[in-house]
């Protein structure tokens, strides 16, 4: 990328990876995208404000960047990029301010769960159906968590790891929109926050992250398969890192 940065929002659209905002001593509003066919990064229109610790998703040909924070504010705001318009516009804000939270798109709806609102870590969640002009609450998670990852596997949401306000956690919860409830799943082998997850086929991978007790940054990779739980893969990330991941 054009500069090093952390706490970015990442989303993919039409095989292109978008990286928005972030932090490197100061907060960014810049957006870059990576085109694998050309093997190059290009600058895109900037966000409506500088921020990081936010989340990105793509739905119906558009990119959405949700929540986040900067030096002075925590956000519930949502920015939407329509590539045909070529600019970011303010979209329907979330019900709560959230930073370091999990977000994912499932069956045409955006979900945002957990995070930190500037005073406390959250167990709450909300959902925006793109056919309706407002966010709705969903049932609370069983665990307060931020700095976690939210992934979609088998038409269910997996809230993986994170930080509960005191320490890194290994717990995993699954939300089935049809049942409208969270259930606890087998925990990861290692507690980790600021981790990346990615789904490839029928496997969910947990990559890197940090153990907050001693600030140890990880390069280990675990794999989850429905019915067989978590296993250590023996694979290593490209260095020890707290990261984002996209499967294309």
Image (cartoon, rainbow, N blue to C red):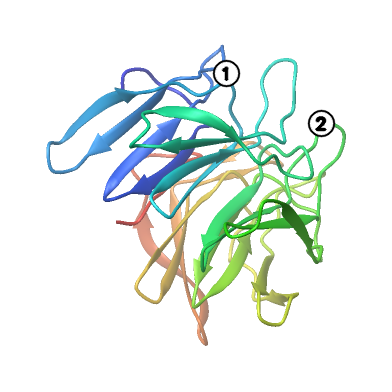
**Corner quadrant of residue 17:** top left
Q: Secondary structure at mark 1?
A: loop
Q: Residue at x 41, y 72 (%)?
A: 203
When the figure is inspected, residue 167 is found, relative to residue 186, above or below; the finding is above
Q: Residue at x 81, y 31 (%)?
A: 118
At horizontal 66% and vertical 60% (from top left) the residue drawn is 170
Between 98 and 189, the one nearer to me in the picture: 98
Vertically, is 111 above or below 239? below
Report, in whole angstroms, how far the alpha carbon at label 1 lies from the one at label 2: 17 Å
* Residue to which mark 1 is pinned: 50
The residue singled out by tag 2 in the image is 118
Residue 35 versus residue 183: which sits nearer the camera? 35
Query: Residue 216 at what x, y percent from top left?
Result: 58, 39
Q: Is residue 234 left or right of residue 167?
A: left
> Against 15, is 214 above or below?
above
Percent across and percent down for residue 202 are: 39, 77
207 to 51, vertically: above or below = below
Q: Where's residue 82, x and y in %? A: 41, 38
Residue 244 appears anywhere in the view: no
Badge 1 or badge 2: first in the primary sequence: 1
Q: Quadrant of the N terminus?
A: top left
Count all numbered tags in the image, as a single digit: 2
Instruction: Find out whether the residues at labels 1 and 2 contact each other: C-beta distance under 8 Å.
Output: no
**Front tag of 1 and 2:** 1
Residue at the location (60% across, 66% down)?
158
Q: Position of residue 28 (x, y in %)?
A: 51, 18
Q: Is residue 169 left or right of residue 130?
A: right
Residue 96 seen in this snapshot: yes
Badge 2: residue crowd in 10 Å (few <14, some 14–19, many ≥20):
few
Quadrant of the image containing the C terminus: bottom left
């Amino acid at each position: 990328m054009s500069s090093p940065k952390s706490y970015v929002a990442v989303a993919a659209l039409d095989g292109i990876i978008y990286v928005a905002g972030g932090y490197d001593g100061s907060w960014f509003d810049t957006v870059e995208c990576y085109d694998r066919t050309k093997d190059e990064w290009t600058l895109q229109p900037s966000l409506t404000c500088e921020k990081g610790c936010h989340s990105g998703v793509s739905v119906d040909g558009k990119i959405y960047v949700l929540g986040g924070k900067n030096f002075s504010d925590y956000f519930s705001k949502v920015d939407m990029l329509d590539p045909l318009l070529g600019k970011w516009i303010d979209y329907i804000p979330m019900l709560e301010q959230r930073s370091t939270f999990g977000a994912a798109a499932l069956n045409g709806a955006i979900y945002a769960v957990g995070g930190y609102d500037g005073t406390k870590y959250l167990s709450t969640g909300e959902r925006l159906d793109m056919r309706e002009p407002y966010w709705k609450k969903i049932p609370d998670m069983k665990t307060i968590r931020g700095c976690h990852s939210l992934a979609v596997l088998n038409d269910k949401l997996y809230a993986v790891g994170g930080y509960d306000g005191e320490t890194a956690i290994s717990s995993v919860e699954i939300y089935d929109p049809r049942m409208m409830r969270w259930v606890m799943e087998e925990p990861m082998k290692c507690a980790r926050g600021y981790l990346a997850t990615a789904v490839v086929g029928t496997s969910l991978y947990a990559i890197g992250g940090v153990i907050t007790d001693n600030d140890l940054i990880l390069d280990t990779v675990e794999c989850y398969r429905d019915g067989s739980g978590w296993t250590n893969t023996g694979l290593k990330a490209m260095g020890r890192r707290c990261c984002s991941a996209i499967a294309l």
